[in-house]
């Protein structure tokens, strides 16, 4: 009786052991290398100059062009040469000469290169032809086919652009560590070789047979027999008699040619290469990774006619088109054949927690429109995001709104508390819109295309009862790479083998269409796909989050004024035009930095140097565009333009959809001397004055003469009590602050409720030890809740006593090395108490949060998300509840019960947690990998507490959060009659008119985007004082869907839109540039 231990066959293909006598010894018929380093494998007849190498180091750390590289000075180099330091580029000129020997003539010849780092082969005429990856890991890509039919003495000359970084950057002794600036790479291999194609084929056959022996159950017929066949192959092969290869292949073939039945599960395999747009390398290196990885795929397509590959992130496609004009047409050839498949529809694979709803729309708008333009009208039906850290609740609706209908990921397989229960299901947004969703059951987007992943695609498919389809993404990824020939060959062998699922190459679009057709009774998963890992990424790298928030709203305001000015002014003669190209450029930078390792804070220091520069540019140019657009808008309307010197009036602009009354801080220097003294309160340094401006209309402005300021109806005061505590008070709130800066009472006068229960505190700074299991910048783990302490208490002084703004200044030395200073602000008209905070932060794995305990009882807290709001539990009843111990919220988190609630608003934070009646806002972390400077230094942040009457859905928390982030804008202006005008009014308190932008296709039309922020149907009446000629409902790509009726009367146009619960609606309004209309309207305004 024979026994077949399952490990018996392992040595047969080992690279580590026995490779001089096992199958690996037969893989090459001949090898030849450079003169100085002939090794034991070298062919005795080889020409001594088979491989000649010359090198040119690019200056400094520059990544120079091919043309620049051609003019470099090249000097000889050879095996053993060291290349470095980290990030340096070398250009190597390679000349290979086929030896004059019968072993080489007529054979396929490979160039084999291993410099332990990344490289790109260029032809002499400047075409990138193949990416190479050194080292011995699975991502090794060392072979480049020189010819299929070699001739003696034939020469091949080409260049290698050698990048001194590995696939995963140049971390200091460990993948996610900060950069080691002094890494060097060793040229280990540079040779030409004749492969033994039969031996390679046997090698691939054997991988499948052995894989089946290991992966199929030992007690299954095919599993048991696979082991016998593998053993027979080992016993048949003799390394000293290569004629044994043919009978070995016959054994494999007999076994692998047994086919499946009709009802076999189908695995659709698609080549993919996840290229993180920046992570452990900067954007500049990613551009080269795209060329290296995708050039290699073109070569595979030439060799394997069934092979298909999909690539996402239109930013990467744009880089390829702009930077690699000789590679672009080679890729496009296969795009046209349908084998190189652009996918995803977004600009980058963005973070899906932090970006605003409008940012999500823009990710698709730029992505899908790039696809339409470059790929003959194509757009992606599949929202493709294999690797981001949780998926926002409204995404299914946004996907549909932007022309998609399917969703793909696998990231929730990384959950560290609960296993996600579905593979194929309908994912439903807050409004109920559904997209067909598939999580590839191999649980990876970097499959090696082996038997293990193919069989796991069935074993781990949780919906076998309702579907018979799985998707398999194969190819090395994260740092690029993609599929290699071995993977393609393995999959080809597994196409139809009894015991395995059927495997076929196919595009994601084909896969989803089939899945939709064949699946029955799928489950619906409603709302957020919360990722139970990487919860620190809502907070890490605070400056990036802050910049993202500020830029989202800055560009929004520029677009509002710019689009109105452009649409109204189109028939006028002006030297101004809508800055479309500049705005596109700025938006693309915002979108790029939303990449799923950049905005989350998980990239290296070098990446954030780039992003800081981009954000600076966006904010500088954006502010300039804003000023120009406002001036232009008022010029088009014929109303007084803003002025900067000697102003006697101010015009105050409100770019939100609610009318508001605000205390406005005005710089005094541009004002006329006559009005400077009219200020009821000035700042301590005398540089700004406070002006109360009532009734600023929605999406409109009010101009007030500073000489005739209306009386201020309210007062705010700050006082010290005899017991050493302090209080702030206005008509709405009474805020008690103890001598250490903690809130001891917060009386909401309208309801008489004290928001802070007796004996409890608000505004408590708490420091948590924050040492995760591995992913430093990414993770905060549940156990951090068990180890925290209150920060050292503060010292309070009164900074402003009123009469319209009362301010307490507090200084907290929160740790021995970090200081927090804060202004606790209560303005006369305000219903919120504000905390303007600065922190000088120098810590190691500490997490700073601020905590408020509210006298409110609720099982759920409500948080803002992109284009909506959602609830998460305030308790740890189940493991699913507990897993959400840290969650993402946008501009507010709210804890409400019947009749009363409290919200914490913020201007740049995203991490929230609510446990019982205590809500915390996460402020700053201090991870050390992969960026060891992360969050060290100065921080500016603002938050506010808003106690309110009614539950969340009866409150105006959405508005308060919005207005906290979009301040009114005041500009000094010349003396003018008091003017106020609203350009858009909306009558439903639950609906937000979020975005007003110029149409992508028509300079005379504007786009409005609205959403229901609370969850309730509405019939919304919109009014505008702008002249309209047409209104259409459009999708997010701005394609017209249906006309909307409207009525104009007395210079006001009104129209009605029905909005479903949590619906997002886009409208296209065609404006009339009619001059007469404007004059009539201006007169009407002026005579009011
Ligand atoms: Zn990634």
Image: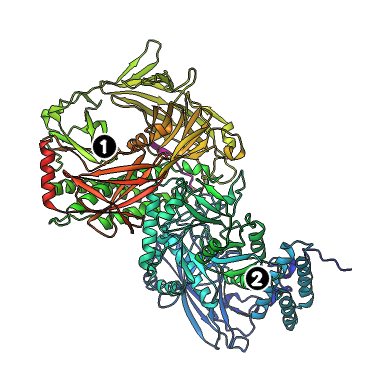
Q: Is residue 535 above or below residue 750?
A: below
Q: Is residue 139 above or below residue 1058?
A: below
Residue at image coords 21%, 27%? 686
Q: Tags 1 and 2 in contact by the CB under 8 Å rule?
A: no
Residue designated by label 2 = 494
Q: Examine the image and state in which quarter residue 961 appears.
A: top left
Q: 934 or 800, which is in the foreground?
A: 800
Q: Examine the image and state in which quarter residue 73 appears.
A: bottom left
- Give the residues in magenta: 931-941
Classify 10 Å Cα crowding around label 1: few (below 14), some (14-19), many (20 and above). many
The image shows a total of numbered marks equal to 2
Q: How far from the left and from the top, in percent, is residue 396?
A: 46, 51
Q: 66 or 468, which is in the foreground?
A: 468
Residue 551 seen anywhere in this rendered image of the structure: no
Q: Earlier in the sequence, mark 1 or mark 2?
A: 2
In what quadrant of the picture does the C terminus appear?
top left
Q: How far from the left and from the top, in percent, is residue 267?
A: 61, 65
Q: How far from the left and from the top, in percent, is residue 217?
A: 75, 61
Q: CA distance from mark 1 to mark 2?
A: 64 Å
Residue at image coords 29%, 52%? 1044
SS of the residue under disc 2: loop
Residue 162 seen anywhere in this rendered image of the structure: yes
Could you tell whether 930 is left or right of 283 in the image?
Answer: right
Instruction: Respond yes or no on whether mark 2 lies under 8 Å from ligand 1.
Output: no
Whether residue 939 appears in magenta in the rendering, the answer is yes
Please tell me the numbered disc located at residue 978: none
Residue at image coords 40%, 38%? 891
Residue designated by label 1 = 968
SS of the residue under disc 1: loop
């Amino acid at each position: 009786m024979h026994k077949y231990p399952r490990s018996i066959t392992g040595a047969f293909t080992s690279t580590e052991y026995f490779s001089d006598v096992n199958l690996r010894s037969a893989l090459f018929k001949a090898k030849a290398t450079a003169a100085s380093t002939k090794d034991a494998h070298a062919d005795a007849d080889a020409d001594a100059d088979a491989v000649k190498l010359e090198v040119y180091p690019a200056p400094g750390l520059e990544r120079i062009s091919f043309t620049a590289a051609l003019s470099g000075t090249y000097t000889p180099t050879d095996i053993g040469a060291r290349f470095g330091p980290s990030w340096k580029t070398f250009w190597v000129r390679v000349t290979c000469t086929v030896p004059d020997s019968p072993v080489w003539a007529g054979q396929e010849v490979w160039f084999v290169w291993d410099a332990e780092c990344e490289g790109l082969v260029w032809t002499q005429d400047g075409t990138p032809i193949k990416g190479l990856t050194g080292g011995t890991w699975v991502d090794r890509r060392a072979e480049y086919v020189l010819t299929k039919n070699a001739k003696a003495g034939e020469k091949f000359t080409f260049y290698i652009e050698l990048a001194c970084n590995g696939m995963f950057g140049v971390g200091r002794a460990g993948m996610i560590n900060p950069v080691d600036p002094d890494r060097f790479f060793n040229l280990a291999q540079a040779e030409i070789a004749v492969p033994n194609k039969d031996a390679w084929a046997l090698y691939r056959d054997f991988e499948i047979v052995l894989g089946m022996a290991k992966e199929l159950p030992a007690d299954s017929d095919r599993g048991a027999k696979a082991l016998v066949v593998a053993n027979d192959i080992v016993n048949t092969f003799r390394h000293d008699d290569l004629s044994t290869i043919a009978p070995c292949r016959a054994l494999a073939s007999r076994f692998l040619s047994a086919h499946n039945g009709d009802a076999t599960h189908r695995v659709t395999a698609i080549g993919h290469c996840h290229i993180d747009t920046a992570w452990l390398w900067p954007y500049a290196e990613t551009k080269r990774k795209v060329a290296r990885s995708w050039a290699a795929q073109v070569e595979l397509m030439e060799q394997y006619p069934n092979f298909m590959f999909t690539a996402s992130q239109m930013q990467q496609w744009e880089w390829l088109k702009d930077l690699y004009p000789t590679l672009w047409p080679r890729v496009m050839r296969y795009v046209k054949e349908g084998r190189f498949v652009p996918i995803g529809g977004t600009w980058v694979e963005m973070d899906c927690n932090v970006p605003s709803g409008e940012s999500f729309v823009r990710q698709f708008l730029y992505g899908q429109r790039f696809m339409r333009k470059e790929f003959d009208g194509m757009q992606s039906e599949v929202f493709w995001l294999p690797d981001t850290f949780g998926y926002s609740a409204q995404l299914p609706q946004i996907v549909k709104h932007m022309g998609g209908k399917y969703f793909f990921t696998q990231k929730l397989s990384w959950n560290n508390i609960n296993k996600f229960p579905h593979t194929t299901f309908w994912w439903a947004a807050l409004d109920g819109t559904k997209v067909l969703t598939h999580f590839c059951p191999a649980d990876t987007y970097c499959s090696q295309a082996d038997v293990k992943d193919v069989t796991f695609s069935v074993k781990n498919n949780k919906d076998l009862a309702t579907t018979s389809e799985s998707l398999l993404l194969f190819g090395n990824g994260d740092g690029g790479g993609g599929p290699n020939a071995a993977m393609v060959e393995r999959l080809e062998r597994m196409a139809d083998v009894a015991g395995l699922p059927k495997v076929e190459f196919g595009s994601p679009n084909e896969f989803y269409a089939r899945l939709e057709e064949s699946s029955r009774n799928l489950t619906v998963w409603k709302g957020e796909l919360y990722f139970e890992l990487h919860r620190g990424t809502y907070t890490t790298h605070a400056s990036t989050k802050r910049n993202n928030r500020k830029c989202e709203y800055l560009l929004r305001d520029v677009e509002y004024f710019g689009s109105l000015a452009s649409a109204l002014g189109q028939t006028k003669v002006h030297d101004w035009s809508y800055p479309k190209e500049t705005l596109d450029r700025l938006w693309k930078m915002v979108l790029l930095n939303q990449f799923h390792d950049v905005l989350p804070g998980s990239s290296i220091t070098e990446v954030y140097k780039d992003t800081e520069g981009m954000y600076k540019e966006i904010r500088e140019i954006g502010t300039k565009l804003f000023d120009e657009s406002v001036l232009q808008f008022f010029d088009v309307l014929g109303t007084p333009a803003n002025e900067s010197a000697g102003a006697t009036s101010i015009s105050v602009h409100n770019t939100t959809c609610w009318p508001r009354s605000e205390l406005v801080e005005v710089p005094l220097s541009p004002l006329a001397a006559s009005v400077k003294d009219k200020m009821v309160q000035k700042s301590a340094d005398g540089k700004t004055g406070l002006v109360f401006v009532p009734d600023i209309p929605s999406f409109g402005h009010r101009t007030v003469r500073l000489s005739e300021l209306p009386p201020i109806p309210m007062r705010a005061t700050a006082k010290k009590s005899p017991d050493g505590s302090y209080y702030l008070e206005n008509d709405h709130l009474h805020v008690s602050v103890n001598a250490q800066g903690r809130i001891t009472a917060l009386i909401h006068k309208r309801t008489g409720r004290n928001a802070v229960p007796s004996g409890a505190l608000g505004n408590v700074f708490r420091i948590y030890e924050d040492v995760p299991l591995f992913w430093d910048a990414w993770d905060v783990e549940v156990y951090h809740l068990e180890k925290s302490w209150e920060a050292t208490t503060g010292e309070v002084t009164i900074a402003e006593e009123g009469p319209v703004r009362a301010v307490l200044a507090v200084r907290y030395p929160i740790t021995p090395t970090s200081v927090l200073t804060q202004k606790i602000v209560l303005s006369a008209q305000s219903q919120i108490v504000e905390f303007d905070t600065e922190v000088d932060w120098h810590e190691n794995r500490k997490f700073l949060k601020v905590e408020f305990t509210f006298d409110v009882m609720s099982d759920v807290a409500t948080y803002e998300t992109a284009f909506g709001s959602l609830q998460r539990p305030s308790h740890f009843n189940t493991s699913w509840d507990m897993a959400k111990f840290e969650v993402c919220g946008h501009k507010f988190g709210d804890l409400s019960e019947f009749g009363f609630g409290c919200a914490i608003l913020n201007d740049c934070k995203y991490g929230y947690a609510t446990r019982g009646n205590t809500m915390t806002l996460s402020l700053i972390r201090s991870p050390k990998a992969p960026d060891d400077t992360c969050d060290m230094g100065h921080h500016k942040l603002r938050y506010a507490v808003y106690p309110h009457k009614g539950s969340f859905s009866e409150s105006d928390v959405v508005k308060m959060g919005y207005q906290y982030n979009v301040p009114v804008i005041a500009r000094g202006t010349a003396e003018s009659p008091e003017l106020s005008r609203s350009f858009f009014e909306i009558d439903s308190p639950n609906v937000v008119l979020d975005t007003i932008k110029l149409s992508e296709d028509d300079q005379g039309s504007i786009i409005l985007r609205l959403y229901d922020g609370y969850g309730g149907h509405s019939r919304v009446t919109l009014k505008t004082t702008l002249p309209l000629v047409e209104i259409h409902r459009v999708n997010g790509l701005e394609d017209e869907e249906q006309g909307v009726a409207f009525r104009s009367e007395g210079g006001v146009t009104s129209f009605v839109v029905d909005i479903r619960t949590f619906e997002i609606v886009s409208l296209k309004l065609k404006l009339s540039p009619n001059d007469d209309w404007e004059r009539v309207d201006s007169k009407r305004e002026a005579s009011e």
